Amino acid sequence: MRVETGLNPSHRHSRDRAGRDEPGGDWLRFYDRLRLLSVDVALAALGGGVMAARVVGVTMPRTFYLLLPLSVWVVYTLDHLLDARRMGAAAHTPRHRFHFRYRAFLWPACTAGAVLCALLAFWGLSWLGLAFGAGMCGLVLLHLLLVKAAGSLASPLLAKELGVGVIFTAGVWGLPLLRHGWARGADWPLAILIQYFLLAMVNLLTFSLAEAHADAADHQTSFVLGVGPRAATAVTWAILAATIALGIGVAIAWPTPVPLVSEGVFAAMSFMLASILLWPRWMHAHERYRAIGDGAFLLPLLLALV
């Protein structure tokens, strides 16, 4: 697998807690550390990989279920480390302050993770899979360069959010699709793929809404800063509505086990993401929106039971 006038509640909270992530503080609690280290995002990618394999009807090698979450963790950690190096200790989000503080450990860990990804890829992927992996690395590099070039430019073109959504979805679904082809079967797998991408976009936009003030203070590009919170919220609701409408169509047209279970999972994910928009003050406090938003993407793991 980011609103109100004045100081955003999540921004105020992150500033209030700026000094509380010392040893023994709240941010060193086990669950908080997992979130700060992007472990939840890596597990969300694993859930998406399980869903993709079930939906397209392929059996993926065990290597895939190790390589996918590890590669996502490496990419997210690298991105946070690069941002933290630029922002320094004055970063406005706990995540970036954490990566800056523990950079001496995280840089070697990220490098080791990247090396392990390469070894797993050469060991477990075909030449076509290796070519796909190389293409994904190039796409990630291009995205990082574009975001860096954009700097604090407020983008009305979803430059950051769209790039992350495309990369995350392609990385999760790419190898199962390559293994399957797309020559056989019904059209519903494509509809589910589209829904997954749309929900990823909703996740990214809700985070951008919650972190708009922090993005502005840290000179980060953002769709929300480009169009304003009201328009960004409307776009987010529109994408969520399109996802739900597409899901209803899939459930009616293909009432078979995997599509129906997938749509049940998507319905629960949609409700969790909608709750962030419906109760922003409560969600922004203590960064609850991150726990809910990223937690929603763990639900596709349920398809391992189908």
Image (cartoon, rainbow, N blue to C red):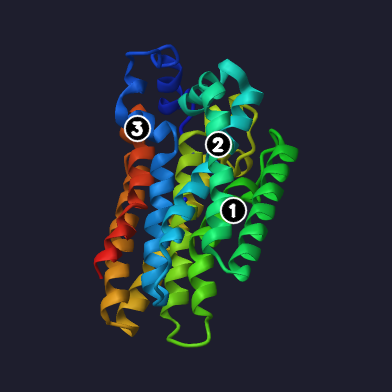
Res. 23 in view: yes
Q: Label 3 amino acid?
A: Arg
Could you tell me if the residues under marks 1 and 2 are in contact, i.e. CB atoms within 8 Å? no
Q: Mark 1 against mark 3, which lies toward the viewer?
A: 1
In the rendered image, which quarter contains the C terminus? bottom left
| Residue in the foreground of this view, choosing between 95 and 37 | 37
Q: Quadrant of residue 264?
A: bottom left
Q: Secondary structure beneath disc 2? A: helix
**Picture coordinates of residue 300 (x, y %)?**
33, 60
- Alpha-carbon span between mark 1 and mark 3: 25 Å
Q: Mark 3 against mark 2, which lies toward the viewer?
A: 2
Q: Give the label on residue 110, or none.
A: 2
Q: Mark 1 against mark 2, which lies toward the viewer?
A: 2
Q: Report the residue marked by disc 3.
A: 281
Q: Secondary structure beneath disc 1? A: helix
Q: Residue at x 29, y 64 (%)?
A: 304
- Alpha-carbon span between mark 3 and mark 2: 34 Å
Q: Report the residue marked by disc 1.
A: 162
Mark closer to the chain start, 1 or 2: 2
